[in-house]
Amino acid sequence: QVQLVESGGGLAQAGGSLRLSCAASGRTASSLTMGWFRQAPGKEREFVATILWNGVSTMYADSVKGRFLISRDNAKNMVELQMNSLKFEDTAVYYCAAELGAVRSTDYHRFALWGQGTQVTVSS
């Protein structure tokens, strides 16, 4: 059974940066598609970014493209999200997600494994 644990959330000013990390334990993460989703109060969970097992194939939401960078280190069973040029509207709980195999989807229903979430708050 895979467990995902996020870290790195917190408070940042608009224009600032934060880095989120997600550690996968329980099995090797190398066969997993991993990604980040977020959920703001009163809104549905939305796609942020995903990365395939090879660490090369990535997908980004239009709202974060050019500002966020997803990366992974399979040797450490870890995926990270570098968030730059933060905006107030980036405020949300960020969730790490994973699924076996190659998942090229922005639909959060396609991901079965989830972390507990980490709060990101951007002050304007």
Image (cartoon, rainbow, N blue to C red):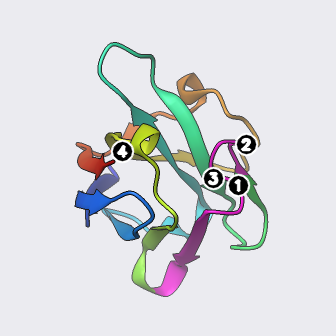
Write the start and end of the magenta stretch as one range. 60-75
Residue position marked by numbered label 2 in the rendering: 62
Q: CA distance from mark 4 to mark 2?
A: 17 Å
Apparent side of residue 124 relative to residue 106 in the rendered image (left or right): left
Residue position marked by numbered label 3 in the rendering: 50
* Between discs 4 and 1, the one toward the N terminus: 1
Q: Residue at x 70, y 50 (%)?
A: 60
Residue nearer the viewer, 124 or 3: 124
Q: Are marks 1 and 3 in contact (CB under 8 Å)?
A: no
Q: Is residue 65 magenta?
A: yes
| Residue sitting at the far top | 42
Element type at marker 2? loop
Compared to 105, does 27 lie above or below? Answer: below
Task: Give the quarter of the image for residue 25.
Answer: bottom left
**Which-is-in-front pick, marks 4 and 1?**
1
Q: CA distance from mark 4 to mark 3?
A: 13 Å
**Which-is-in-front pick, marks 3 and 2?**
2
**Which-is-in-front pick, marks 1 and 3?**
1
Q: Given the image, on which type of amino acid does mark 4 rest?
A: Tyr
Q: Residue at x 35, y 41 (%)?
A: 91
Compared to 112, does 31 lie above or below? Answer: below
Element type at marker 1? loop
Q: CA distance from mark 3 to mark 2?
A: 13 Å
Q: Are marks 1 and 2 in contact (CB under 8 Å)?
A: yes
Q: Residue 65's mark? A: 1
Image coords of residue 42 (percent x, y): 33, 13
Q: Given the image, on which type of amino acid does mark 3 rest?
A: Thr
**Which-is-in-front pick, marks 4 and 3?**
4
Residue position marked by numbered label 4 in the rendering: 94
